[in-house]
Amino acid sequence: MSISEALETIELQHVINKMTLYAISRLRSVKVKSFNGREPLDFVGDVLLKALDQQRDWEKAKCSIEEFLFGCLRSEISNFFVTKQIETTNYIPEDLFEPETPSVDKEKELATKLLVEAGADDDEQIV
């Protein structure tokens, strides 16, 4: 199955939203104010483009497409810091390079906060 076929089998917008929330959480944990003008969604977009351009090899992956994309996102963010593309004058936690699985409660809290900021009503927040 090609990467484009695999992407068609999932609810892509939902996966992009989850990846963006993960990137926000991961980047905030570093406590650096600027990422050279990059936003969390930029990291997600880079991952998708690299996957579609076959710079990230989905066909050899032995996991689901969603796991593959999240693994690529973790790698993309870690590589960004390893190559020192930002000035790290602030402290970077040692656990930055360890795989992090956000808890369901933290994801709910962050998602709810983003929905409230976007003006979502109670029904939208519940869903």
Image (tube, rainbow, N blue to C red):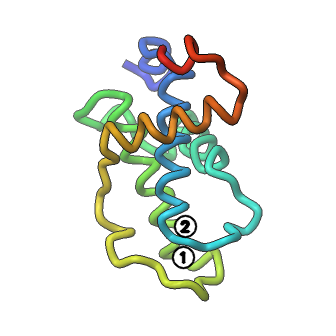
Of 126 and 27, the residue lying toward us: 126
At label 1, the amino acid type is Thr
Checking the image for residue 12, the label placed there is none
Label 2: how many residues lie within 10 Å, few (<14), some (14-19) or many (20+)?
some
Q: Identify the secondary structure beneath mark 1.
A: loop
Q: In this view, which residue lies farthest toward the bottom?
A: 89
How many labels sit on residues?
Answer: 2
- CA separation, marks 2 and 1? 6 Å
Return the residue at label 2. 80
Where residue 101 sits in the image (x, y, percent)?
A: 30, 48
Return the residue at label 1. 83
- The N terminus is located in which quarter? top left
Q: Is 118 rendered above or below residue 49?
A: above
Q: Identify the secondary structure beneath mark 2.
A: helix
At label 2, the amino acid type is Phe
Of 60 and 83, the residue lying toward us: 83
Q: Residue at x 71, y 58 (%)?
A: 38
